[in-house]
Image: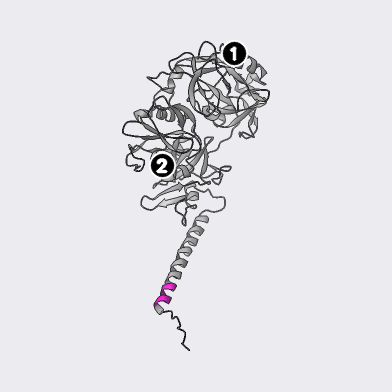
């Protein structure tokens, strides 16, 4: 009988296996020590820095998603469809995108903020979007930046990729503009973070800062696909990118959508101390805060007017596209609707922008060249949150034709339609800014309840 061969394990193979085991044990011991130190780097009750809390979440095993470190640039980036990078600042929900080499943190607004003509064909610096996002000496500039609270102690300048891109297979970011507090997403941001398969695909259409060599500007479709705009009269959404200091303390939250990180909080006792984006109750309806001034606060209805169980559809006018309380919709809002409002004495007269924009100059600020005085109005292109409901009128007048008005159609696109066609109506109004907050937490399901103005403050 033949003898069976016995497989012998050579000493070299034994040493190799031992070496592999030692390497594996060293790797996991290193990770254990690192995480232990990170988890115990603050004492109970001691403030936790936002950047420290984020870096604890660094992804090691799967570097295609989560918070991933690029060791060459020393930049951390949230990749893919993560769900723990939410942050609330100044009443707005943001997504944390990255931590730069200086430990500053780059954010993008979770939702689009408005609809408007972009002017991006002239480049970001000269665009209407830049004017809308950033405060400057220009009148009516900084609609977005002006709502950001304590920005001197929170914001730093934001990098904006300015590369000209003609080939979507060769997207770069070699030219950077860092002169503004507020920027936009670029093609490079979208590519690096994961494109359609990332949190940057939020189901909304919005502008990107990138242009091609013929000054066509890129934007995203609501599907997450990249498109190129070659018409300056197209209207799309605006998302804002800001950069905050990494050494800010976390006041509350863990990064989830329902419990976002909170880095700024203040007591709200009067309406003019509330955040833009918070909610108030007036009668049976809920309203969203659109603009906060010291003496008055602009709000817009959550939803549209109803006729019983159905949405109320009404014509804008038969003769004009310039809103006033004499138009069909203006008369209804300032008579029938206004007289049904409980606590109508909370409402103050407002000036609603009705100036005309022309094809040769699509600057949103032109709407302020003329105003209509009324108790109740509607939102216009360039107003925060004008995009939130479809099949509605705006106050924006159709381009170079007095019988057209800009509407948001049932698909969420902005276009001009005849002023006599019927659409849904979302009322907006100004309230006395000194109204007292008597209860509520400012959320949609827990809106602030309002009380009379304190007599001592009149």
Alpha carbons under labels 1 and 2: distance apart: 47 Å
Vertical relation: 38 (above or below) 424: below
Vertical relation: 250 (above or below) 450: below
Q: Residue 348, can we see it?
A: no
Give percent across and percent down for residue 240.
45, 35
Give percent across and percent down for residue 119.
39, 27
Q: How many other residues sit within 10 Å of disc 1, few (<14), some (14-19) or many (≥20)?
A: some
Query: Which SS does the magenta portion mostly show?
Result: helix
Give percent across and percent down for residue 281.
64, 28
Q: How many other residues sit within 10 Å of disc 2, few (<14), some (14-19) or many (≥20)?
A: some
Identify the image quadrant of the C terminus: top right
Q: Residue at x 33, y 30 (%)?
A: 215
What residue is disc 2 on? 189
Q: Residue 434, can we see it?
A: yes
Left/right placement of residue 37 relative to residue 303 reads left
Q: 255 or 21, which is in the foreground? A: 21
What residue is disc 1 on? 331
Give percent across and percent down for residue 269.
61, 31
Q: Point out the stretch of residues depicted in magenta.
A: 12-17
């Amino acid at each position: 009988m033949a003898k069976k061969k016995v497989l012998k394990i050579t000493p070299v193979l034994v040493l190799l296996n031992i070496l592999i085991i030692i390497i594996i044990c060293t790797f996991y011991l290193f990770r254990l020590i690192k995480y232990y130190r990170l988890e115990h780097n603050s004492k109970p009750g001691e403030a936790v820095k936002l950047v420290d809390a984020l870096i604890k979440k660094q992804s090691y095993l799967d570097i295609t998603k989560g918070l991933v470190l690029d060791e060459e640039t020393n930049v951390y980036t949230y990749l893919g469809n993560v769900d723990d990078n939410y942050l609330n600042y100044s009443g707005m929900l943001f997504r944390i995108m990255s931590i730069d080499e200086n430990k500053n943190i780059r954010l993008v607004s979770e939702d689009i903020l408005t609809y408007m003509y972009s002017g991006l064909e002239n480049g970001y610096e000269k665009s209407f979007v830049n004017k809308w996002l950033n405060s400057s000496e220009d009148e009516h500039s900084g609609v977005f930046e002006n709502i950001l609270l304590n920005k001197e102690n929170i914001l730093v300048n934001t990098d904006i990729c300015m590369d000209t891109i003609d080939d979507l297979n060769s997207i770069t970011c070699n030219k950077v503009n860092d002169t503004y507090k507020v920027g936009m997403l670029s093609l490079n941001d979208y590519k690096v973070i994961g494109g359609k398969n990332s949190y940057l695909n939020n189901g909304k259409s919005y502008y990107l800062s990138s242009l091609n060599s013929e000054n066509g500007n890129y934007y995203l479709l609501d599907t997450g696909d990249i498109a190129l705009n070659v018409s300056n009269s197209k209207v799309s959404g605006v998302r804002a990118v800001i950069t905050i200091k990494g050494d800010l303390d976390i006041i509350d939250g863990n990064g989830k959508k329902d419990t976002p990180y909170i880095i700024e909080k203040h007591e709200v006792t009067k309406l003019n101390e509330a955040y833009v984006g918070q909610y108030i109750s007036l009668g049976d309806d809920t309203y969203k805060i659109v603009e906060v001034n010291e003496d008055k606060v602009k709000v817009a209805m959550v939803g549209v007017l109803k006729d019983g169980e159905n949405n109320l559809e009404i014509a804008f006018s038969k003769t004009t596209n310039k809103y006033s309380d004499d138009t069909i919709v203006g008369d209804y809002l300032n008579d029938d609707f206004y007289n049904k409002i409980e606590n109508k004495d909370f409402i103050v007269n407002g000036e609603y922008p009705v100036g005309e924009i022309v094809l040769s100059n699509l600057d949103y600020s032109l709407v302020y060249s003329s105003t209509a005085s009324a108790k109740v109005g509607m939102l216009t292109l360039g107003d925060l949150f004008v995009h939130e409901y479809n099949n509605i009128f705006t106050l924006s007048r159709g381009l170079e034709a007095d019988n057209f008005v800009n509407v948001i159609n049932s698909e969420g696109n902005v276009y001009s339609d005849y002023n006599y066609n019927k659409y849904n109506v979302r009322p907006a109004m100004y309230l006395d800014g000194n109204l007292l907050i008597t209860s509520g937490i400012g959320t949609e399901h827990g809106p602030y309840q309002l009380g009379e103005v304190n007599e001592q403050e009149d």
